[in-house]
Amino acid sequence: MQSVTERIVKGAITVFVKKGLQATTKEVAKEADVAEVTLYRRYSTKENMFITVIKNVLEKKFHSLVLEMAKEENTELFLMKIIEDRLELLSKNKDLVSMLLSETLRGNLTEQINLPEIIFSSLKQGLEHHFKLKNQSVDIEFCARQLGGIFLSYIILPHPKPYYKLTAVEKQNIAKKHAQAVITTL
Amino acid sequence: MQSVTERIVKGAITVFVKKGLQATTKEVAKEADVAEVTLYRRYSTKENMFITVIKNVLEKKFHSLVLEMAKEENTELFLMKIIEDRLELLSKNKDLVSMLLSETLRGNLTEQINLPEIIFSSLKQGLEHHFKLKNQSVDIEFCARQLGGIFLSYIILPHPKPYYKLTAVEKQNIAKKHAQAVITTL
Amino acid sequence: MQSVTERIVKGAITVFVKKGLQATTKEVAKEADVAEVTLYRRYSTKENMFITVIKNVLEKKFHSLVLEMAKEENTELFLMKIIEDRLELLSKNKDLVSMLLSETLRGNLTEQINLPEIIFSSLKQGLEHHFKLKNQSVDIEFCARQLGGIFLSYIILPHPKPYYKLTAVEKQNIAKKHAQAVITTL
Amino acid sequence: MQSVTERIVKGAITVFVKKGLQATTKEVAKEADVAEVTLYRRYSTKENMFITVIKNVLEKKFHSLVLEMAKEENTELFLMKIIEDRLELLSKNKDLVSMLLSETLRGNLTEQINLPEIIFSSLKQGLEHHFKLKNQSVDIEFCARQLGGIFLSYIILPHPKPYYKLTAVEKQNIAKKHAQAVITTL
DNA sequence: CATGAATGAGTTTTCATTCAT
DNA sequence: GATGAATGAAAACTCATTCAT
């Protein structure tokens, strides 16, 4: 079996992803197969455990390559890449993403793990980078909001199939249409 | 002072909007200045009180005129109207909307008060109506998702000023740009 | 439909027989299809309703003919008659009897509806009468206790078939054996 | 002062014997001088606490020596022993026994702590044993019911003095008379 | 470093009963 | 004579957190 630390982290993630901050320390303890007190020794409060664990996941999973992609000179291709990449990632982590959005909407989350803020600011950064390279003046705020809206629509609105389960062609078509729409407004 | 019923309904809305299903009956009772039992006499369970009260608010506040707007023959104007109208409404009711989205993301809400579903399906209905009138064949699902995404982006992503506080001109500009972007993809 | 009074009495009996004093006024009101307050207007407290209603039932159903039977000169026949009669009655009203015994054992019942006391004293009375007629000196207390024990054994101890469902012959055999056993100790 | 466990068990017994399943966890907690939660930590539910504690008492107090007594070859002596032994025990634990009978009559008790069933089946076992040894064919069911009835009569029917407070001679007389009555029916 | 034991403060819900109409 | 509305008090059970070992 894994180390205590590993068990705790994995257990906490499992439980928090499923239930958010409402999850109880008891559930986490059970999932991790440790005593409740052990969690308190390590994290002192439930909130702190939540933040610590989730921040870690976010850093690992959502590490954005936006800046790399921003180097792509062709704006349409650049936008398509971002869209495809983020939709893939977000839809693959629907439970985590939903939970984080839910908590954010409740005002329960500090900046460090506020997913909308993270997404929005990293988008703005990437766009800024891209258009600076291209020496183009663009309403970045608006553009980032458009992209963010696209992402949210695939998480929150009902859909028959999550993005990541579509065929490569379907994914590309979607990304292309959205990219073109965004470009219209530049 | 108002009637008991009024006080209960108002109090329940106030508290539920602020805290969602996590709110306690005690809080509602205090806000409405009635005994907790009184709430149970009327609604049997907290969940039921929540649903009853919120459904009512939704029906009153979010009664959509989409079908009326759909009669507008000019697609761009039609889209602009929808966008302006919904953004105004949603941003004015940010707390309620945020709470409902949060609960939906948690899977706590039945269809009747599931805001994303309500928005999405009413959008699809309106679009269908509009393009049928115009005898135009359009990917309604995609189009509705775009619009939904726009709405969500103004609720969930950070913004310096809520939509409804912008000047008329700013509002129109925003609506126009989004409408044009949507049209690109038809 | 029946009169309000009838509905209340019947409903109360039904509910009280099933649940004893634990039954709630709400249940009674529902069963009788009247408002809870109506019950309070008539009986002022739940306890009082219970006593009033149950006393009535006891008087109607358990009206003992022991004194009549006591005229039977043949002691064995007399005992058999009592045994058959009471076992029939008690087993036919198992729910009511069980409930009353249960409440008595809890010390919840006043003398007027204390079934064990009623049974015991009416037995003693009958026996006294019978043996006075026969000019026989007998330990009435002991004898009544024996008979009472027999009755209780058929209510409380497990049995495959309630007494009243046995064949006439089986019933008689049982009564006879018990009667003879009692006579031994006179 | 005693250990927490001891205090809880004793307190629970005290309270449950007095009030049965109606007793509240609050009362038990107070009697045991612990917090209510502590009880839940240990027993999960009130029902479970009740069953656990009472089963324990039954096993300790009502451990039947019927099988030992059954070795007595003289049937009258055997029956007398059983009767004396059980009447002594039952009358000494009147409160516990009354409470258990009361709960049983309400159908609240599982087999493991259903006193009538326990008494009845242990009686049948003892009788079976005895008469097998003596190679005698007897209606055990009837006989056990007679004995059970005797026991019940001393618990439930009114009496001026509990059995265990009688003089040794009185006890013996009673046992003897009942034993002889039972023997008549073999 | 880990944990078994304990708890104060709440949470939803139920009940017998009263008040005003 | 009947009832809709309202309630104080209490019940079972849960939760985050601390203490002693």
Image (cartoon, coloured by chain):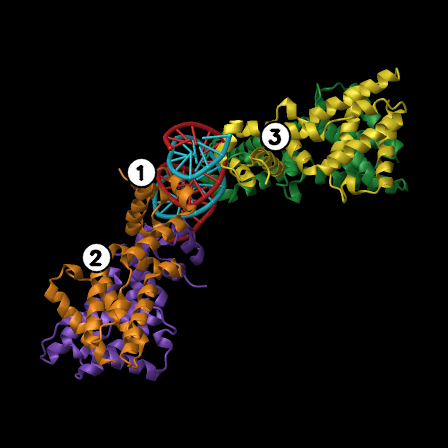
Chain colours: A purple, B orange, C yellow, D green, E red, F cyan
Q: Are marks 3 and 1 in contact (CB under 8 Å)?
A: no
Q: Are marks 3 and 2 on the same chain?
A: no
Q: Is residue C18 visible?
A: yes
Label 3 environment density (alpha carbons within 10 Å; few <14, some 14–19, many ≥20):
some
Q: In the image, D53: left or right of A14?
A: right
Q: Image quadrant for the C terminus of chain D?
A: top right
Q: Secondary structure at mark 3?
A: helix
Numbered label attached to residue D170: none
Q: Amino acid at mark 1?
A: Asp
At 35% from the left and 67% from the top, the residue drawn is A94
Question: In which quadrant of the rendered view does residue D19 lie?
Answer: top right
Q: In the image, D118: left or right of A74?
A: right
- Dot in front, 3 or 2: 3
Q: Residue under circle 2?
A: B92
Q: Chain of mark 2?
A: B
Numbered label attached to residue C53: 3
- Dot in front, 3 or 1: 3
Q: Secondary structure at mark 2?
A: helix
Q: Position of residue B42 (x, y in %)?
A: 40, 44
Q: Amino acid at mark 2?
A: Lys
Q: Between residue A162 and residue D171, name the one nearer to us.
A: A162
Q: Residue under circle 1?
A: B33
At 86% from the left and 36% from the top, the residue drawn is C172
Q: Amino acid at mark 3?
A: Val
Q: Position of residue B114 (x, y in %)?
A: 35, 61
Compared with A165, D58 (above or below) is above
Q: Are marks 1 and 2 on the same chain?
A: yes
Label 1 environment density (alpha carbons within 10 Å; few <14, some 14–19, many ≥20):
few
Label 2 environment density (alpha carbons within 10 Å; few <14, some 14–19, many ≥20):
some
Whole-angstrom CA distance, mark 1 to mark 2, is 27 Å
Q: Between residue A87 and residue B70, name the one nearer to us.
A: B70
